[in-house]
Image (spheres, rainbow, N blue to C red):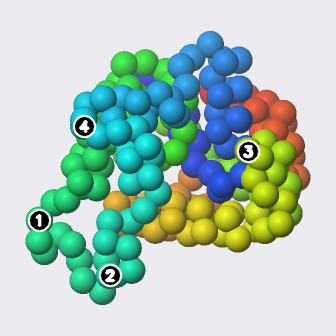
Amino acid sequence: MKNRVITISREFGSGGRTIGKQVAAELGIPCYDNELLQKIAQESGFHENYVKEAGEYAPGGFLASAFSHRNSGPNNADYLWTIQYRIISELAEKGPCVIVGRCADYILRDKADCLRVFIHADLKFRAERIVQEYGERAESPEQRLKDKDKRRAAYHRFYTDMKCGHAQNYDLTLNSGTLGIRQCVNIIKGLY
């Protein structure tokens, strides 16, 4: 039997990271989020902040849609993607775990007994949450949410050719604003 792995993809501010960590803690399995960034940084030789930022931007930015960077060969982002892909695959093979973000839903689509979850919520819920949880400025958190979601979606689309957040790409989508963080944790645990 294959190992049981849960991947958590999420909209920024929806509580996906919190949900993933709680699910893992209550199931007694590892959760890889910042730990994954550390592993990628250590292996690549890049600073952890660089790895974190690179995972939020599609290589080439605006021009990537018009002129593929792949014509000029691999770049730092491609190098990091290769390392990320291998590390996530190895973690899934090693044993049960929860992996938050980093396109793990795509990477593990055929490699593990994997429950792919997407956490979302309406803009108001997420805006209030990032002000409370992350100390974001209360003036305009909505714009920060939109920018971060747009960058994550572009990165996901660039490397997976899948649209992030589309229900057909996941086994389960949960609205944390409607259900609440606790109920999302309970639902995911119930499916493990």
Asked if the residues shown at circle 4 and circle 1 are in contact, with their CB atoms under 8 angstroms apart, the answer is no
Q: Is residue 139 visible?
A: yes
Q: What distance separates the C-alpha of mark 1 from that of mark 3?
A: 38 Å
Callout 1 secondary element:
loop
**Lateral position of residue 75 relative to residue 143, left or right:** left
Choose between 108 and 44: the one closer to the eye: 44
Quadrant where the N terminus lies? top left
Residue 32: percent from left, percent from top = 50, 29
Q: What distance separates the C-alpha of mark 2 from that of mark 3?
A: 32 Å
Asked if the residues shown at circle 2 and circle 3 are in contact, with their CB atoms under 8 angstroms apart, the answer is no
Asked if the residues shown at circle 4 and circle 2 are in contact, with their CB atoms under 8 angstroms apart, the answer is no
Q: Is residue 173 visible?
A: no
Q: Earlier in the sequence, mark 1 or mark 3?
A: 1
Residue 173: percent from left, percent from top = 68, 52
**Lateral position of residue 40 relative to residue 188, left or right:** left
Label 2 neighbour load within 10 Å: few <14, some 14-19, many 20+ = few
Residue 93: percent from left, percent from top = 35, 24
Q: Which residue is mark 4?
A: 44
Q: Amino acid at mark 4?
A: Ser
Q: Earlier in the sequence, mark 2 or mark 1?
A: 2
Residue shown at 51%/60% (left/top)?
152
Outermost residue toward the left? 72
Q: Amino acid at mark 1?
A: Gly
Q: Earlier in the sequence, mark 4 or mark 2?
A: 4
Q: Amino acid at mark 3?
A: Tyr
Callout 3 secondary element:
helix
Label 3 neighbour load within 10 Å: few <14, some 14-19, many 20+ = few
Q: Which residue is mark 3?
A: 134
